[in-house]
């Protein structure tokens, strides 16, 4: 097994504190850490084109290695909440079927400002970020998060939180209907999607949007990391259709599906079912790769964490990934260590 842990960088820590944290994580059975180095508005490395919170990643790489941990740069991808970007380039952002720009009127929450995956300018912007990370000595991998469209249908348990019912695909949550996407689809299919009565029923349009994200991963971003010898991994959704994320065909080194059972009103057995379903989808597409079961610690007590690890392993997962470090209590760590040895 190989086990991972997502880690936020907001809290200031001394080098000694980081060393102690990494040593304890490794002793507990973690093999790879995922520090959040781009959180949609600030970078935690010495970027030359993004607002920099602190050039911390460069300092963490040797400390992680000293503790025998791999270190993977966790970056938000399509969400971009940098004011200089949305002010200067509102046209880079997704447009909903209702015609609203995600830069101005995002769905659900203010930070849901998603970039359009069809725009060459967006590709250049994202390539630059991945290239900067790929150039960092010693970094083991680049982890793509928010590599998708906004949820056209939210996970079941989240809908009441926003006081909405999504029994089908509604226009205000359905993306991207910008000019570039519409033109590209028209060239490929001969169909003007704005003239189609029910776009949600158009299988070709659905596939077109899966392919926009897949192309970004397979042809544009992953090759930059791979060429520099970095592993490329992604945080992905079990309800992949609802975020237009056909991750089972992606050319990445591993996938970390976020199997957060409480978001879907499901029990722990569902976590195993989703591991199995994901592995089978990858196998059917001929591109099997390791799947690490992403576990949502706030919805798991220590005994449930043990159970989630067991069902994931039994279903073929190559390990688990903990979300997140801050949520792990000493009792969770104990349960984790016992369940992973
Ligand atoms: Zn678009």
Image (cartoon, rainbow, N blue to C red):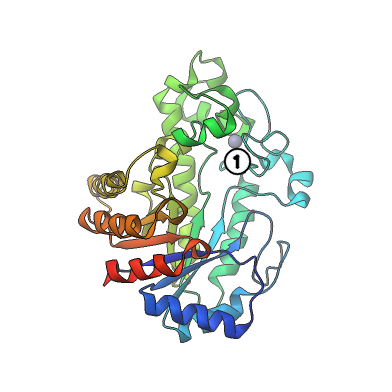
38 up-or-down from 121: above or below: below
* Location of residue 5 in the rendering, given as x and y in whole percent from the top left corner: 45, 65
Residue in view at x 63 percent, y 30 percent: 179
Q: In this figure, which residue is indicated by the disc labeled 1?
A: 116
Respond yes or no on whether mark 1 lies under 8 Å from ligand 1.
yes
* Residue closer to the observer: 114 or 116: 114
* Residue closer to the observer: 62 or 191: 62
61 up-or-down from 191: above or below: below
* Location of residue 240 in the rendering, given as x and y in whole percent from the top left corner: 40, 40
Residue in view at x 56 percent, y 79 percent: 18
* Residue closer to the observer: 255 or 137: 255
74 up-or-down from 267: above or below: below
**Left or right: residue 2 compared with residue 177:** left
The answer to which quarter of the image holds residue 36 is bottom right
* Residue closer to the observer: 164 or 287: 164
**Left or right: residue 169 compared with residue 108:** left
**Left or right: residue 156 compared with residue 119:** left
Residue 253: tell me if it is visible. Answer: no
Q: Which quarter of the rendered image does ligand 1 occupy?
A: top right
SS category of the residue bearing label 1: loop
Question: What is the total number of numbered labels drawn onto the structure image?
Answer: 1
* Location of residue 273 in the rendering, given as x and y in whole percent from the top left corner: 26, 45
* Location of residue 229 in the rendering, given as x and y in whole percent from the top left corner: 44, 72
- Please identify the quadrant where the N terminus is shown: bottom left
| Mark 1 burial class by Cα count in 10 Å: few <14, some 14-19, many 20+ | many
């Amino acid at each position: 097994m190989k086990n991972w842990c997502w880690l936020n960088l907001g809290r200031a820590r001394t080098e000694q504190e980081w060393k102690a944290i990494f040593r304890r994580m490794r002793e507990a059975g973690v093999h790879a850490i995922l520090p959040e180095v781009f959180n949609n508005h600030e970078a935690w490395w010495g970027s030359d084109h993004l607002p920099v919170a602190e050039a911390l990643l460069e300092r963490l790489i040797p400390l992680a290695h000293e503790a025998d941990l791999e270190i993977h740069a966790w970056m938000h991808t399509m969400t971009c909440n940098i004011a200089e970007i949305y002010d200067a380039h509102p046209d880079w952002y997704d447009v909903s079927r209702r015609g609203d720009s995600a830069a101005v009127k995002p769905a659900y929450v203010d930070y849901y400002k998603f970039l359009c995956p069809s725009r060459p300018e967006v590709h250049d912007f994202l390539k630059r970020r991945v290239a900067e990370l790929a150039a960092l000595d010693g970094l083991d991998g680049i982890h793509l998060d928010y590599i998708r469209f906004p949820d056209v249908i939210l996970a079941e348990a989240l809908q009441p939180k926003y006081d909405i019912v999504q029994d089908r695909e509604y226009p205000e949550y359905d993306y991207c209907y910008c000019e570039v996407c519409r033109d590209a689809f028209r060239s490929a299919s001969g169909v003007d999607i704005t003239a189609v009565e029910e776009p949600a029923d158009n299988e070709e349009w659905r596939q077109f949007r899966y392919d926009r994200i897949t192309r970004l991963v397979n042809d544009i971003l992953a090759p930059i990391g791979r060429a520099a010898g970095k592993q490329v991994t992604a945080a992905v959704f079990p309800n992949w259709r609802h975020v237009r994320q056909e991750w089972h065909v992606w050319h990445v080194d591993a996938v970390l599906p976020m199997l957060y059972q409480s978001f879907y009103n499901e029990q722990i057995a569902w976590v195993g079912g989703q591991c199995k379903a994901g592995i089978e989808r990858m196998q059917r597409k001929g591109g099997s790769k390791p799947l690490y079961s992403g576990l949502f610690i706030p919805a798991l007590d220590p005994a449930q964490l043990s159970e989630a690890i067991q069902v994931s392993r039994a279903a073929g997962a190559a390990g688990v990934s903990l979300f997140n470090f801050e949520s792990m209590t000493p009792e969770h760590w104990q349960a984790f260590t016992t369940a992973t040895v």
